Image: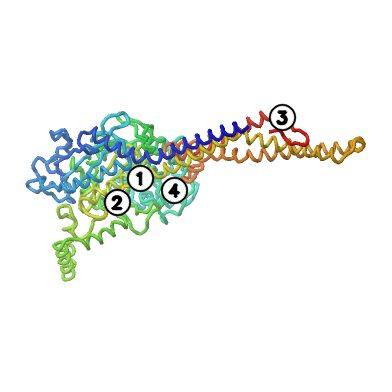
């Protein structure tokens, strides 16, 4: 028996060593793989940097613009101005950008942006990414990596933009307002008779409430249904059983369903499909020829490669998570088209490409207004499809920047302050006009407020951010998870000044921690399996030993005559033995219950996690965790395997040792 025990100890030791090595490898390999990924990308691009850069010397002011064409150097030029820069004049399409000479670009800013991009790629290990920057009227596009089909990412590579789509929906709604079809304070139920909710308060929901996420609709299981709605009208129909989470107009609750209702409202008032309307009234006038709108996030139109699911250094091209996205996240676009969208945002409501007026100037100004009276649940104020992304960190940065500016800039600021104190309101108005016109893309009095929006799906991530006052902006399109708004923010800070946000990936720590826990759970399962035979033997020996002790005790105290006369007592004692044996079996079963409960816990873990997102439907819950949080699913599988294997091994050993261990009277059980 000693040899058996020694062998079991060796097996346990080797199993522990192996799983410990696996755990250490998971924790150590992640940062190493990220550096290797960046280095390999640099080598593949042949530039010594982990991205390829395509620079346009064209103007965002659109002077003499002929659309998007080749600049003759293998890069894509965006809006060539054909020499209009030298005159320093514009056609009025983009008054927010002050023209500067093409030859005066600040290479230092470009280097800083390149450093931020390289850091982002290193930290997030993004398979493919396009970064569009707009500064001083110049559009630059940097691309990196490959698509899910293995093709290099370029300016014309289609990618899903997620919730960045909401600004397009808001623009479509404001166009209806400009056309006089309804007002922002009109009740939606009166404009859209098909809208019904189980909560009577829905009748007070206005168009503006939906635009600003103050309708009382919250994220519900409706958004994560196993059979997502295939059209805005279908989403509206499914709201019939929904209750409001708050009284309309009282608080801000982010709701994708609310923007689906807006998409249906546009369809109803414009008498056109939502996607068709966007193409006719927004995409075409802006020159966004490669941009399309889908009603579901998992739609795969021609030319769209799949995005990636990332787990540490592992990347797998997978289909997108099936979700209803009409009006809230269904647009697919390219870096080239999003550059046109960005140029439009820093203008006056007129298309830089065609000169078409998409919004009246006063409506366009309202389009970019973000209220500051209340912050929604994600911590940023929300307007008509835009967040206020300036944030408290930027306000602190502004104060620090004001303190640390050069003497000349401080003198200018002091002069401005003195002038303001000695002049009337007309002078204030002149000062505001100068700020609006821009000063070489800079606001010397204070850092301009930023607005933008992120877009996060299971296999794509995106972000847009810009300053309507300075005309500086950035767009990120990526085919893997990450935090694009950090990159857009840092790209703008490189030009306008402010505090750089740290680039970090908390999911690396999260995934490594859960992978380590999963390894420990599997180690525990191995130990339970290895020790199951001894565990079963101990349970069987204890039952046999207890029975033998009771029999020996009776023989020691009873004579033959007593046993003959007390057969009734013997039968009672036999029943007592049976009860004792039943008690032993119950104790054994109770020792197996924890393992069975762990099996159930592991199987239910993904569902329990998804319920925190408001998803109670099992199929949808497991699907969401599989796409978004694979480490949680890995932990659940590890728990099921470890506990299930241990439970099975103990039951098998108990069955094998069903017969009692032979016991020698007076010597106890034989070992």
At numbered mark 2, what does the secondary structure look like: helix, strand or loop? loop
Foreground: disc 4 or disc 3: 3
Query: What is the x, y in percent for residue 150?
Result: 30, 29
* C-beta proximity under 8 Å, tags 3 and 1: no
Q: Residues within 10 Å of mark 1 (few under 14, many from 20)?
A: some
Judge by depth and name the residue closer to the eye, 365 or 300. Answer: 300
Residue 82's image quarter?
A: top left
In the displayed structure image, the side of residue 241 where residue 451 appears, left or right: left
* Mark 2 and mark 1 residues within 8 Å of each other at the beta carbon: no
Which of label 1 and label 4 is nearer to you?
A: 1
Q: Residue at x 28, y 36 (%)?
A: 291
Mark 3: give few (<14), some (14-19) or many (20+) Cα within 10 Å: few
Residue 336 is situated, as x and y percent measured from the top left of the image, at 23, 38
Residue placed at 48% from the left, 50% from the top?
Answer: 200
Query: Mark 3 vs mark 1: which is more N-terminal?
Result: 1
What secondary structure is marked by label 4? Answer: loop
Q: Which residue lies under the disc numbered 2?
A: 501
State the CA–CA distance, disc 4 to disc 3: 61 Å
Query: In the rendered image, which quarter contains the N terminus?
Result: top right
- Residue ID for mark 3: 659
Nearer mark to the viewer, of 3 and 1: 3
The residue identified by callout 1 is 505
Which is more foreground, mark 3 or mark 2? 3
Which residue in the rendered view is the most extreme toward the bottom? 422
The residues bearing labels 2 and 4 have C-alpha atoms spaced at a distance of: 30 Å
Q: Secondary structure at mark 3?
A: loop
The location of residue 563, given as percent across then percent down, is 89, 36
Which residue, given by chain and number where applicable, does mark 4 sit on?
218
Residue 259 seen in this snapshot: yes
State the CA–CA distance, disc 2 to disc 1: 13 Å
Q: Which mark is residue 268?
A: none
């Amino acid at each position: 028996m000693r040899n058996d025990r020694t062998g079991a100890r060796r097996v346990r030791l080797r199993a522990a060593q192996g799983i410990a090595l696996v755990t250490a490898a998971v924790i150590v390999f992640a940062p190493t793989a990220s550096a290797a990924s960046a280095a390999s990308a640099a080598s593949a691009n042949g530039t010594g940097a982990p991205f390829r850069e395509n620079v346009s010397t064209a103007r965002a002011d659109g002077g003499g613009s002929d659309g998007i064409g080749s600049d003759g150097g293998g890069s894509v030029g965006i809006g060539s101005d054909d020499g209009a820069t030298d005159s320093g004049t514009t056609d009025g399409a983009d008054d927010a950008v002050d023209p500067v000479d093409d030859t005066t670009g600040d290479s230092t800013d470009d280097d800083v942006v390149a450093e931020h991009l390289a850091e982002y790629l290193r930290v997030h290990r993004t398979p493919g990414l396009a970064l569009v920057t707009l500064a001083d009227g110049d559009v630059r596009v940097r691309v990196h990596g490959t698509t899910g089909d293995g093709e290099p990412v370029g300016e014309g590579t289609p990618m899903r933009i997620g919730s960045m789509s909401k600004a397009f929906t808001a623009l479509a709604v404001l166009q209806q307002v400009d056309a006089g079809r309804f007002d922002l304070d009109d009740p939606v139920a009166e404009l859209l008779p098909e809208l019904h909710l189980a909560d009577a308060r829905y009748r007070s929901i206005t168009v503006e409430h939906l635009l600003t996420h103050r309708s009382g609709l919250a994220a519900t299981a409706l958004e994560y249904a196993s059979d997502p709605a295939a059209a805005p009208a279908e989403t509206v129909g499914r709201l019939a059983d929904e209750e409001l989470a708050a009284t309309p107009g009282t608080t801000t609750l982010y709701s994708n369903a609310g923007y689906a209702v807006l998409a249906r409202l546009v369809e109803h008032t414009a008498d056109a499909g939502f996607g068709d309307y966007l193409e006719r009234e927004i995409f075409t006038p802006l020159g966004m020829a490669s941009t399309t709108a889908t009603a579901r996030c998992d739609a795969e139109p021609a030319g769209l490669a799949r995005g990636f699911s990332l787990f540490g250094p592992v990347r797998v091209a997978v289909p997108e998570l099936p979700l209803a996205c009409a009006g809230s996240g269904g647009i697919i676009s390219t870096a080239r088209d999003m550059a046109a969208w960005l140029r439009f945002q820093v203008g006056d409501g007129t298309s830089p490409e065609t000169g078409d007026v998409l919004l009246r100037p006063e409506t366009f100004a309202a389009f970019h207004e973000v209220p500051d009276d209340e912050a929604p649940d994600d911590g940023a104020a929300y307007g008509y499809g835009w967040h206020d992304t300036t944030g408290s960190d930027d306000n602190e940065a502004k104060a620090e920047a004001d303190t640390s500016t050069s003497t000349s800039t401080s003198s200018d600021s002091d002069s401005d302050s003195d002038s303001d104190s000695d002049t009337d309101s007309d002078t204030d108005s002149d000062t505001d006009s100068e700020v609006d016109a821009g000063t070489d893309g800079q606001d010397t009095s204070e850092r301009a407020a930023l607005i933008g929006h992120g877009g996060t799906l299971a296999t794509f991530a995106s972000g847009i951010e810009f300053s309507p006052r300075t005309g500086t902006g950035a767009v990120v399109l990526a085919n893997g998870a990450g935090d694009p708004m950090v990159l857009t923010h840092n790209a703008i800070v490189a030009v306008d000044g402010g505090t750089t946000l740290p680039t970090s990936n908390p999911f690396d720590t999260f995934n490594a921690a859960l992978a380590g826990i999963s390894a420990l759970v599997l180690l525990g399962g191995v130990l339970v399996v290895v020790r199951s035979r001894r565990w079963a033997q101990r349970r069987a020996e204890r039952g046999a030993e207890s029975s033998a002790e009771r029999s020996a005790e009776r023989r020691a105290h009873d004579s033959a005559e007593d046993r003959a006369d007390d057969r009734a007592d013997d039968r009672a004692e036999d029943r007592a033995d049976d009860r004792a044996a039943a008690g032993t079996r119950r104790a054994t079963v109770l020792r197996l219950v924890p393992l069975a409960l762990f099996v159930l816990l592991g199987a239910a873990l993904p569902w329990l996690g998804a319920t925190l997102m408001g998803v109670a439907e099992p199929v949808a819950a497991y699907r969401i965790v599989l796409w978004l949080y694979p480490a949680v699913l890995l932990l659940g599988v590890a728990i099921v395997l470890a506990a299930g294997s241990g439970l099975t091994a103990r039951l098998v050993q108990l069955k094998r040792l069903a017969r009692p261990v032979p016991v020698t009277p007076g010597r106890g059980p034989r070992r």
